[in-house]
Amino acid sequence: MKHHPDAGQRQILAAIESERALLMDAARPEAMKRLAERGRLSARARIARLVDPGSFDEIGALAASEPEAGKLPPRQTSPADGVVTGTARIDGRPVVILSQDFSVFGGSIGKLGSAKTQRMVKIAIRRGIPMVLMLDGGGHRIQGGQNSRHFAHANGMFHDLARASGWVPMVALMLGAGFAGPTNYAGLADFVVMVRGQSVMGLAGPALVKAGTGEDADQETLGGAEVQVDKQGLADLGVANEDEAFAAARQFLSYLPGNARKSLPFVPTDDPSDRGDDALLDILPDSTRRAYDMRRVIAGIADVDSLFELKPTFAGNIITTFARLGGRPVGFIANQPMRAGGILDANACEKGAHFIALCDAFGLPLVSMIDVPGFYIGSTAERTTLGRRSAKLIFEWGHASVPRVSVVIRKGFGLGYFAMNGGRAFDADACFAWPSAQICAMSIEGAIDVAFRKDYMAAPDPQARRQQMIEETRAQTASIHAAEGFGVDDVIDPRTTRRRIIEIFDQVPPRRENDHPPKFRSIAPI
């Protein structure tokens, strides 16, 4: 594009806008056709589906590499250098947006695309606004990366993402190919969504894996949603289509402030704070060996229709869900008796620890709903390095500064009771027990078999004596005794749980004073 030196402002602007129009979807029918044949939206169409109408202001649309002799202008061969970036609003609140363009060199990251991406992170940090990454492409663009003159510089992208962590909410929507760099971006995000049957992520795609290791594996086997959402937990949510991914991003952000220094976003509710749900009295089965759905308990306490669960298909023995209480966003962490009795294994500890850190970073009070038989034991558990991974859950409770309340619903056994913030373990603002609670150092049957086997085996009827000892011990674990010893603040009517928690969160300050020793940092047990 050339401008006559005497051209007026209007003429120059018109010429620039004509150039800009060539970069839009309407001017690229062949590229859009190829995307449509793959069942994909364009980068700009995705942004339009996610953000408030008319709110997107693009940054770097005219960025272009140096032209090459005899070739088309770079703005036409590599529009926006493969990534559309800018700011917008979601539900009226400002956000930074980045959307990779698969139609440009497969969404790979070029030199200027990398610079634009890094600038978006810096804008999010400086302005203190959330960031949404829509990822659909490979890692570094091979055509421009196999040159140490360029690649040796690296860049500060990961440095800045690490600095942004805990300051602004970060969402990664994996909308297609996401191997290499995009996977590392997602690994540093707070919330990661994959589209089932469409999204893949991992450190290397099939071709590179084959070249580097000789292994033959397709994309789904390496990093499809069944692997990364359901089995590994690298992503938080698997959805059926892109519109569900956009809806999940909006819902996730609705529970969080724009940054860690802003107030929580309250949502007015007509759900009474003193609502007592009679169903809570009947949820628990008579036998402690029978399961029930802890989600029903949480739903009976939280504001109506306010739950938004993270990692619902991974480590199902623990539940981590956003909710609201009296309009205030909170985080519920709960054992799920329907999966392995709610026992804590390595994956559950990782999942719980990350959730505590997320809530603590952005100021969401925590509610721990306890029905835990302890930690998973045995050689299989030890091979998962559970001793260190369980410490992550304990570590995060010890560093959290947000208000927290614990409620023992049924079992509170062993070190698992500690790790779920039971009793005085982590100075809860309130610790309650339901009448059904049983609290002790280990499973009652196990305790009798370990400590008193010789005694009951010496009885005329060993099994009858064993059962008698079990019943005698069970009576000592009852909730009334926990209150007598002041290990819990009170045994409460389950129907008052909602009111009691709301009142406590209304009374306590949003953060505790930092009472850590004058160290520079803690060392996470990872």
Image (spheres, rainbow, N blue to C red):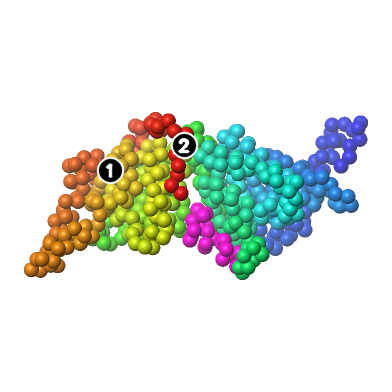
Question: Which mark is drawn over residue 465?
Answer: none
How far across and how far down the image is residue 104, in percent? Answer: 73, 54
Q: Which residue is mark 1?
A: 423
Residue 397 visible in rendering: yes
Confirm whether the magenta stretch covers residue 306. Answer: no
Residue 304 visible in rendering: no
Q: Nearer the viewer, residue 174 or 516?
A: 516
Quadrant for the N terminus in the image? top right
Q: CA distance from mark 2 to mark 1?
A: 27 Å
Confirm whether the magenta stretch covers residue 225. Answer: yes
- What residue is at 67 percent from the left and 45 percent from the top? 154
Determine which quarter of the picture holds residue 93.
top right
Q: Nearer the viewer, mark 2 or mark 1?
A: 2
Q: Which residue is mark 2?
A: 521
Q: Nearer the viewer, residue 439 or 319?
A: 439
129 is higher (above) or lower (below) than 23? above
Q: Residues within 10 Å of mark 1 (few under 14, many from 20)?
A: many
* Residue type of the residue flagged with mark 1: Gly
212 is higher (above) or lower (below) than 330? below
Magenta segment boundaries in residue numbering: 217-238
How far across and how far down the image is residue 367, in percent? Answer: 36, 44
Q: Residues within 10 Å of mark 2 (few under 14, many from 20)?
A: few
How far across and how far down the image is residue 54, in percent? Answer: 66, 41
- What residue is at 40 percent from the left and 37 percent from the top? 402
Q: How many marks?
A: 2
